[in-house]
Image (spheres, grey):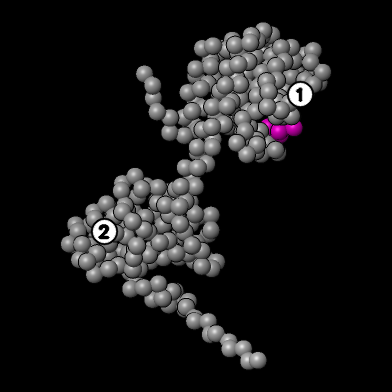
């Protein structure tokens, strides 16, 4: 049965499971690095636990660093104790030898994400089919990484937060709000609010085509979650017909601060819009 894959994390897990039935190594793993540290993101151990998810080492001290330096091709070391690059490494001494195979995972821009690797304390003979599998799976994971990045950009466009000053931003909510889009808006808004250390977020509803139960539920959930992370939400731009829908709804929104317009919301928190006067030049 073919299952849809939602993101890089799911793809990584499924790929390692499949590879573990083909590649004769004890441990298969995917690691992410920031050029300073190397973190094990996903791992499958067969007989012995050599690595655990979440483990972190200095990038310079890892086989993954050797793989990245090797370029966009397979690095295959069948005897760690005999290889000139690995025989004196601390990680080799800890393993007491063995084999390693790995290849970088890159974004389409060429930026490195990390590596997909195999590791064993015993000597392993890698066949061409194993090398081809690693190469193919690294390419697939690179493609999924790019999809994840595009999806994040789309999510940010679904909730285009506009910073006004330190601690203050406006979120124009535009168009129809489906349940799926509501979840995207909530996740993106919470993430951006936290990153920008907001104190106030003005939710401008003037671009919403229609207010329904799902929209009201979104506003309540978003307002409550913003409050929990220390952000005060303010609703503006509610049209008369939208106000009637809200009043007749069984959902309660009276705990959310509402102002008529953006200038009113800014005035409430001590800011004002000032019109810039044009200066006439005299010649």
* Quarter of the picture holding the C terminus: bottom right
**Residue 182's x, y, as percent?**
35, 50
Res. 62 in view = no
Q: Which mark sits nearer the N-terminus, 1 or 2?
A: 1
Residue 106 among those drawn in magenta: no
Tell me: residue 128, above or below residue 185: above
Q: Residue at point 49% right, 81% down?
A: 274
For label 1, the crowd category at 10 Å Cα-Cα, with few meaning under 14, some 14 to 19 and many 20 or more, is few
Q: What residue is at 68 percent from the left and 32 percent from the top?
A: 57
1 or 2: mark nearer the eye: 2
Q: Is residue 34 left or right of residue 21?
A: right
Name the residue that disc number 2 marks.
210
Query: Quick one: 176 or 222, which is closer to the camera?
Result: 176
Percent x, y for residue 200?
45, 65
State the image coordinates of residue 45 (x, y, percent, origin top left).
56, 18
Residue 169 seen anywhere in this rendered image of the structure = yes
How many numbered marks are there? 2
Residue that numbered label 1 is attached to:
90
Please report the residue visible at 48 percent of the width from the left and 45 percent of the height from the top. 152
In the image, residue 267 above or below residue 221:
below
């Amino acid at each position: 049965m073919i299952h849809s894959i939602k993101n890089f994390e799911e793809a990584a897990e499924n790929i390692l499971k499949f590879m573990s039935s083909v590649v004769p190594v004890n441990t298969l793993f995917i690691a992410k690095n920031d050029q300073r540290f190397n973190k094990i993101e996903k791992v499958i151990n067969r007989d012995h636990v050599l690595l655990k998810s979440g483990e972190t080492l200095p990038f310079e001290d890892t086989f993954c660093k050797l793989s990245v330096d090797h370029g966009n091709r397979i690095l295959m070391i069948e005897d760690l104790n005999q290889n000139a690059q690995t025989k004196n490494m601390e990680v080799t001494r800890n393993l007491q030898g063995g084999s390693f195979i790995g290849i970088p995972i890159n974004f389409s821009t060429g930026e490195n994400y990390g590596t997909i690797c195999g590791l064993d304390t015993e000597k392993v003979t890698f066949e061409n089919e194993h090398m081809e599998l690693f190469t193919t799976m690294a390419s697939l994971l690179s493609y999924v990484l790019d999809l994840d990045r595009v999806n994040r950009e789309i999510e940010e466009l679904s909730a285009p937060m506009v910073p006004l000053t330190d601690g203050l931003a406006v979120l124009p909510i535009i168009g129809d709000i489906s349940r799926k889009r509501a979840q995207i808006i909530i996740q993106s808004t919470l993430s951006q609010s936290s990153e920008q250390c907001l104190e106030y977020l003005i939710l401008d509803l003037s671009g919403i085509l229609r207010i329904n139960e799902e929209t009201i539920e979104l506003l309540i959930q978003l307002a409550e979650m913003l409050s929990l992370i220390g952000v005060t939400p303010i609703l503006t731009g509610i049209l008369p017909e939208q106000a009637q829908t809200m009043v007749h709804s069984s959902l309660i929104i009276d705990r959310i601060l509402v102002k008529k317009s953006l200038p009113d919301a800014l005035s409430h928190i001590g800011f004002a819009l000032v019109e810039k006067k044009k200066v006439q030049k005299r010649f």
